[in-house]
Amino acid sequence: MSRLRALLCCLLLPSLSGCGLGYYWQAARGQLALTSAREPVAELLARDDTDPALREWLRQAGAMLTFAHAELALPDNGSYRHYVELDRDYVVWNVFAAPALSLQPREWCYPVAGCVSYRGYFREPAAREFAAGLAAQGDDVYVAGALAYSTLGKLRDPLLSTMRRLPPERLAGLLFHELAHQRLYLPGDTRFNESYASAVERAGVERWVQAFGTPVERCRHWRWQARAARLRDMLAATRSALAAVYAAAAPAAARLAEKQRLLDRLRRDYQALRAGWDRPPYFDAWFGEALNNAELIALDAYDGDVPAFRALLVASAGDFAEFHRRAEALAGLPAETRRARLARLAARAPALPGPPPGCALSAGRSPPGRPAASAD
């Protein structure tokens, strides 16, 4: 490969921030491996030897893309018209880090994406080695596998075999989320970018399941959103309590002890909440022994401004094209002004939709797997 082509690959990967020597080469190699393994979806659909289950999955993904372009005003630029079969569960692994007594994330700066609060690797051992180095310096660290990531429309992102484990409504959400990054991306503001994409994902899936979902899928989607909303409230309360602890003048040892007490309480509260659920393993991954500042920051990045963007969609009369224009206007504001505007919008956030007929919070199944940081 030419040095120029490798450099371009590195510059175009928003999830893989921090191009330097070994990191630069793993990013370039990883992206080029994906590019060389791509197969056109149209050819796979036309071939007689394509696995029937894969053929049906590709057709379903294609219908979701058509919906995204027509109903959600998301870009139609050739992304997800190819397929890549991977030999691993995740396409990249993202590393998040924060000081032990702070909720301010470590950041890595990058020419196209700006400064972001995660660093991505195409191989899990490399991600965990980097995380171990940060942990040895005293940081809290969190390593999360991602089923997909976005090159922000600079390259034609493919469908990946890692996505096939998702139920239909979650697959639709993932595609809507990644296409939203191609529609709007603000360099240097991870929370804005991920919350905007998450808001598009959730509102888009709500419309998709109403239009095409089965009763089971509609109920499963509502239950997923309702459970996740309750957990987000618990996480937000814990972050607020931790922020007060970290700002206190107490000795570090005392603050660390209080931090552990708050995290232990959060785990207990979650266990009490999940006792009324039938099968919530997806959320279990959020509340393991490794729960720490880095994980709390990672989860907040995807949710912190979602209420504001939900209010913005209402203010746009549900018109996604208008919503995207207004979001672009927010992105163009100075950071402090934008943050204040988002706070005012969040105060007007609408309530979540009620349950579909016959759907209750305490029944049904949650999606399998663990949460992936889709930054994608």
Image: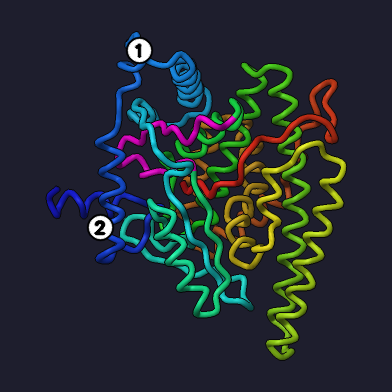
Name the spot of residue 137 as percent of width and height, x first. 50, 80
Residue found at the very far left of the displayed protein: 2
Q: Position of residue 64 (x, y in %)?
A: 50, 23
Q: Which element is circle 1 on?
A: loop
In-front residue for pair 289/373? 289
Look at the image and tell me whether residue 135 can be seen.
yes
What's the magenta bit mostly, secondary-structure-wise? Answer: loop
Chain-order first, disc 2 or disc 1:
2
The location of residue 248, given as percent across then percent down, is 73, 84
Distance from the alpha carbon under mark 2 to that under mark 1: 36 Å
Q: Is residue 45 left or right of residue 262?
A: left
The image shows residue 129, relative to residue 349, as above or below, that is: below
Please report the bounds of the magenta region as a residue range: 147-166
Q: Residues within 10 Å of mark 1 (few under 14, many from 20)?
A: few
Residue 36, quarter of the rendered image: top left
Graded by Cα atoms within 10 Å as few (under 14), some (14 to 19) or many (20 or more), the crowding at tag 2 reads: some
Residue 42 placement, left or right of 327: left
Q: Nearer the viewer, residue 304 or 317?
A: 304
Q: Between residue 336 and residue 108, name the one nearer to us.
A: 108
Residue 49 is labelled as 1
Looking at numbered disc 1 in the image, what kind of residue is underneath it?
Asp
Let me know if residue 152 is in the magenta part.
yes
Residue for point 44% across, 53% down: 186
Q: Position of residue 267 (x, y in %)?
A: 78, 59
Q: Is residue 141 above or below residue 254?
A: above
Q: Residue 207: which disc?
A: none
Closer to the eye: label 2 or 1: 1
Residue 25 badge: 2
Residues tagged 2 and 1 counted as in contact (Cβ below 8 A): no
Q: Residue at x 56, y 37 (%)?
A: 200
Q: Is residue 204 visible?
A: no
Q: How is the image coloured?
A: rainbow
